[in-house]
């Protein structure tokens, strides 16, 4: 089975496992959300969120506490209701908005029966008094105030608190009691006592019938601060020791806070060692009512959507993203879900249960990583088997590494590492071989785009060729014979091209293009190589020129000599002997001169130069002296300008002297009778410049490009009387170039010509040491 099929099956298996994992996790989250299976974790998140949304304490709420100091001053509980009546009158004198007595008066006082009447009159005179109603046990009956007190009170309110499974009081029901007429909460009753026209004050104060019901749940938003509200001791208010007008225009709550007296509740805002009295919970509920804070438990449908969405998105993240990105995605959804659950009460008024979503998101990454790790171990085993079948055993030069016993994945990873190390070495060898090929080489895909190019190809192309069509990269190649474009316009037509073609590029180089297809799995790639034939073609051209020179230029004088000899035999005496010998001598000298020039040029191009320090100034003087005879014969004067006495140079002195002599000889040949050839040596650091200027016909600009080509005579038509085969300046150019210098020409037609031989200077210490 091929690796591609194995990999495809592995991917399909992973997708199926992802679907199964997604279904299981989403089902688990939905079940936890519906069954409230992580309520304790939800309480931790919700309590932290409610602390963020703590309300400021309303300044118009005050508590009159039946505290330990009051018990100590008045005596043990219960107290006479006459004291409560006196307290109500004391408070009523300050005209509070409403007065709530969180004290149950469900039974008559047999010892002081007249006190109930005093309390009823005090409540009635207050006009805004509220009394509590409590549920008796788990049944459907309620503890109501005595009828007289019931009639005197402005409103009744229940004081039931919703205590969660962990024993913490977090909420209440706005309506609770018999089904026919449930009572509002005590905090709502206080607002009704102040203003009975409020919408929530329509509930009856009479005892209803039917089973006990609880309606309109509300999460209690606690106020900030410890204590949150102004609190005054019962005994201080009763004796008039409380601050004057401290209770004026306030919502006054009277209730027990003393140790062991009254209801005490655990609340999210209280510390572990403290509890909140029931009267304080009523104050917090009243504060939320005044702040119009309505926080309710979110409906089940919204809780399901809120919990399932982040888990589904985390599952998508681990499927579509890499390991690190998947982990970061799960962490982001976890943090986002936690933040949304904590901010939802303040932003939407709903309290969400986020624990199932947090548990689901926390399980996504480890479960999926476990499955991917198992799949990776299986894939590594299959890959190793495939590599072993391919003959790639572990590298013998690598020592065995210690392994954890029983660690299957580690063993498989090591085996694949050893096998792939061989593949990397082989790939490195092939890649280096391709990169170091001297010829430009391109690898193209089936569409003709360059996918790989070696260093020679990068040097050859003016711009990076990767990703470009090969037809665009090699667009300047044309056929050598016709000049037509070498490559087709459509790269897909590469298959119709011959395997090798010769072409020229824009720089005039002769190239042989080799194009070879090869297969890579199901695709076809093309290997294109450019072999530079420029030197070979130049050598062929020089060979042709040499053959032409031998067959024509050298052959012509020899043929002339043979013709003269045949004429002398056929017609003896027609030509005088001295004249015959003079002509034979001239033809022989011409042939010898051409042969020597050819041999010298070939030697200058092919031989190894013997570099040694020499004095270029002395070499120039020697060349001028050697040229004196030919200059005198033509009536030309050679003038050497004053220059440096010593010019250190490094090279082959004989060849440099011959090059200077050739330039001088050309200048003398083309100078008119009576003309002057000017020679000079100048220093232009870091070079020496030997200049030779004549007063001859000059060289036209369009002819200077062929000036140093072998066998080129530029004045063959204009000066046929001047001999030569065009080898002298070719030798000059070759010698100077191989010495690291250059030849410069300054000339215009009819104004003479100046040749400048620029040669590198030699360091004096080096020249002296070599000497």
Image: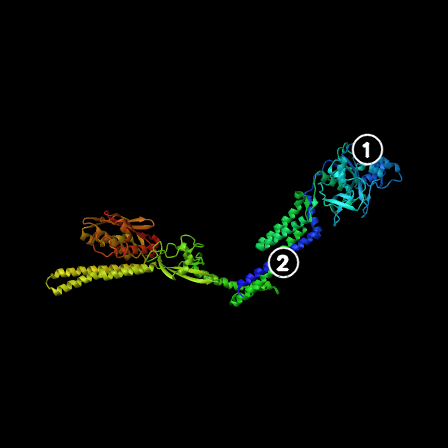
- Distance from Cα at disc 2 to Cα at disc 1: 72 Å
Residue 458 locus on image (x, y percent): 42, 55
Left of 749 or right of it: where is 501? right
Quadrant including the C terminus: bottom left
Residue 317 locus on image (x, y percent): 59, 53
Residue ID for mark 1: 125
Left of 705 or right of it: where is 374? right
* Residue 62 image-quadrant placement: top right
Residue 587 locus on image (x, y percent): 18, 60
Residue ID for mark 2: 20
Decide which of tag 2 and tag 1 comes sooner along the chain. Answer: 2
Residue 601 locus on image (x, y percent): 27, 59
Q: Is residue 745 above or below residue 514?
A: above
Residue furthest out toward the right:
111
Left of 732 or right of it: where is 66? right
Q: Is residue 743 above or below residue 375?
A: above
* Residue 51 image-quadrant placement: top right
Check if mark 2's residue and mark 1's residue have beta carbons within 8 Å.
no
Left of 644 or right of it: where is 486? right
């Amino acid at each position: 089975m091929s690796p591609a099929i194995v990999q495809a099956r592995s991917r399909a298996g992973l997708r199926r496992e992802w679907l199964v994992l997604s279904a299981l996790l989403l089902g688990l989250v939905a079940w936890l959300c519906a069954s409230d299976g992580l309520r304790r974790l939800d309480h931790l998140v919700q309590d932290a969120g409610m602390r963020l949304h703590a309300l400021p304490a309303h300044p118009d709420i005050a508590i009159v506490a039946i505290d330990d100091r009051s018990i100590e001053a008045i005596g043990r509980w219960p107290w006479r209701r006459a004291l409560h009546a006196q307290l109500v009158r004391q408070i009523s004198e300050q005209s509070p908005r409403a007065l709530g007595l969180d004290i149950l008066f469900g039974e008559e006082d047999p010892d002081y029966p007249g006190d109930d009447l005093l309390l009823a009159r005090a409540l009635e005179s207050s006009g805004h008094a509220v009394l509590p109603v409590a549920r008796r046990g788990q049944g459907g009956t309620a503890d109501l105030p005595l009828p007289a007190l019931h009639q005197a009170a402005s409103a009744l309110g229940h004081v039931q608190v919703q205590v969660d499974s962990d024993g913490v009081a977090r909420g209440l029901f706005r309506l609770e009691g018999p089904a026919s007429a449930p009572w509002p909460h005590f905090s709502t009753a206080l607002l009704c006592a102040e203003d009975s026209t409020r919408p929530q004050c329509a509930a009856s104060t009479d005892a209803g019938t039917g089973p006990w019901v609880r309606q309109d749940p509300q999460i209690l938003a606690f106020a900030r601060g410890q204590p949150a509200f102004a609190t005054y001791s019962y005994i201080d208010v009763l004796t008039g020791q409380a601050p004057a007008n401290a209770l004026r225009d306030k919502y006054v709550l009277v209730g027990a806070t003393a140790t062991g007296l009254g209801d005490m509740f655990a609340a999210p805002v209280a510390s572990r060692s403290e509890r909140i009295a029931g009267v304080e919970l009523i104050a917090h509920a009243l504060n939320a009512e005044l702040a119009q804070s309505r926080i309710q438990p979110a409906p089940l449908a919204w809780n399901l959507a809120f919990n399932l969405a982040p888990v589904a998105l985390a599952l998508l993240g681990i499927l579509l993203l890499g390991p690190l990105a998947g982990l970061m995605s799960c962490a982001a959804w976890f943090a986002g879900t936690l933040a949304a659950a904590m901010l939802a009460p303040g932003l939407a008024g709903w309290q969400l249960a986020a624990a199932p979503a947090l548990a689901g998101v926390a399980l996504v990454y480890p479960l999926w990583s476990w499955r991917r790790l198992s799949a990776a171990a299986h894939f590594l085993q299959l890959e190793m088997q495939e590599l072993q079948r391919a003959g790639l055993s572990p590298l013998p030069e690598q020592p065995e590494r210690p392994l954890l016993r029983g660690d299957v994945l580690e063993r498989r990873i090591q085996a694949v590492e050893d096998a792939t190390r061989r593949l990397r070495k082989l790939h490195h060898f092939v890649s280096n071989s391709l990169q170091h090929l001297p010829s430009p080489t391109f690898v193209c895909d089936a569409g003709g785009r360059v996918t790989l190019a070696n260093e020679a190809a990068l040097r050859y192309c003016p711009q990076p060729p990767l990703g470009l069509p090969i037809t665009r990269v090699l667009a300047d190649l044309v056929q050598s014979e016709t000049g037509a474009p070498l490559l087709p316009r459509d790269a897909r037509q590469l298959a119709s091209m011959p395997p090798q073609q010769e072409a020229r590029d824009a720089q005039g180089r002769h190239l042989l293009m080799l194009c070879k297809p090869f297969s890579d799995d199901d695709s076809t790639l093309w290997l294109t190589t450019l072999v530079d034939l420029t030197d070979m073609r130049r050598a062929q051209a020089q060979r042709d020129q040499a053959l032409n020179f031998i067959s024509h230029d050298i052959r012509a004088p020899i043929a002339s000599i043979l013709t003269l000899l045949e004429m002398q035999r056929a017609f003896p005496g027609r030509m005088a002997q001295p004249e015959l010998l003079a002509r034979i001598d001239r033809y022989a000298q011409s042939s010898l001169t051409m042969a020597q020039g050819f041999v010298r040029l070939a030697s200058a191009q092919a031989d190894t130069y013997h570099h040694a320090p020499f004095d270029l100034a002395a070499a120039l003087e020697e060349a001028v002296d050697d040229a004196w005879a030919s200059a005198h014969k033509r009536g030309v004067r050679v003038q050497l300008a004053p220059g440096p006495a010593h010019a250190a140079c490094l090279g082959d002195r004989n060849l440099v002297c011959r090059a200077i002599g050739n330039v001088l000889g050309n200048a003398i040949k083309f100078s008119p009778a009576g003309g002057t050839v000017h020679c000079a040596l100048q220093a232009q650091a870091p070079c020496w410049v030997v200049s030779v200027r004549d007063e001859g016909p000059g060289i036209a600009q369009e002819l200077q490009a062929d000036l140093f080509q072998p066998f080129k005579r530029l004045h063959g038509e204009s000066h046929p009387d001047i001999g030569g085969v065009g080898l002298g300046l070719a030798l000059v150019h070759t010698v100077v170039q191989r010495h690291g210098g250059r030849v410069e020409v300054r000339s215009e037609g009819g104004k003479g010509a100046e040749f400048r031989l620029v040669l590198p200077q030699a360091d004096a210490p080096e020249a002296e040491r070599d000497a």
